[in-house]
Amino acid sequence: MFISFKHYNLIGDVLEESHRVMKKSFETEMYVDGNKLPLNNFVQETIGNIMMSFSKTLKGLDPQPDLIEVKIRRFAKAADVDAHVYPIEH
């Protein structure tokens, strides 16, 4: 199948139209094993909105915090725990 330059221009026009302007409310960074991941604006906003929404459901927290930090560490082996008990801090 042969695709001409005319077709490439049409594809480019469609791709350009699919980009949307959005409001940016958060700067979000994500690190995996110490390596910063590149996050586009949409992913930054999605993660920011999820974490802000989650924090709003927790009792006693400011509903509009300026900074949320989350650290996730994988256990070597999964453990059975009571979901309603707070873990002991190390």
Image (cartoon, rainbow, N blue to C red):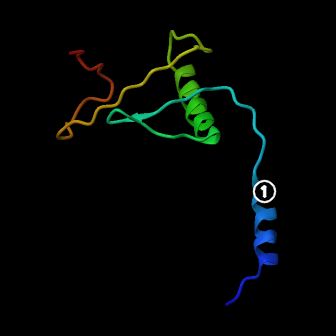
Q: Quadrant of the N terminus?
A: bottom right
- Assign a secondary structure to mark 1: helix
Which residue is nearer to you in this view: 75 or 63?
75
Relative image position of residue 26 (x, y in whole percent) = 63, 26
**How many circles with numbers are drawn on the protein?**
1
Taking depth in this image into account, of 70 and 13 the one nearest to the observer is 13
> Splitting the image into 4 quarters, where does residue 65 fall?
top right
- Disc 1 crowd rating (10 Å Cα; few below 14, some 14-19, many 20+) is few
Nearest the viewer among 2 and 83 is 2
Quadrant where the C terminus lies?
A: top left
Residue found at the far left of this picture = 77
Q: Looking at the picture, how far across and down is residue 16, in whole percent?
A: 78, 56
Q: Residue drawn at (26%, 29%), measured in percent from left and top?
A: 82
What percent of the width, then of the height, locates residue 41? 64, 38
The residue furthest front is: 5
The image quarter containing residue 47 is: top right
* Residue 44 in which image quadrant: top right
| 13 to 53, vertically: above or below | below
- Three-letter residue code for mark 1: Glu
In the image, residue 7 sits, relative to residue 59, either above or below, namely below
45 to 25, vertically: above or below = below
Residue drawn at (26%, 36%) of the image: 74
Image location of residue 32, percent across then percent down: 37, 37
Query: What residue is drawn where x is 57% and y is 10%?
Result: 62
The residue that mark 1 highlights is: 16
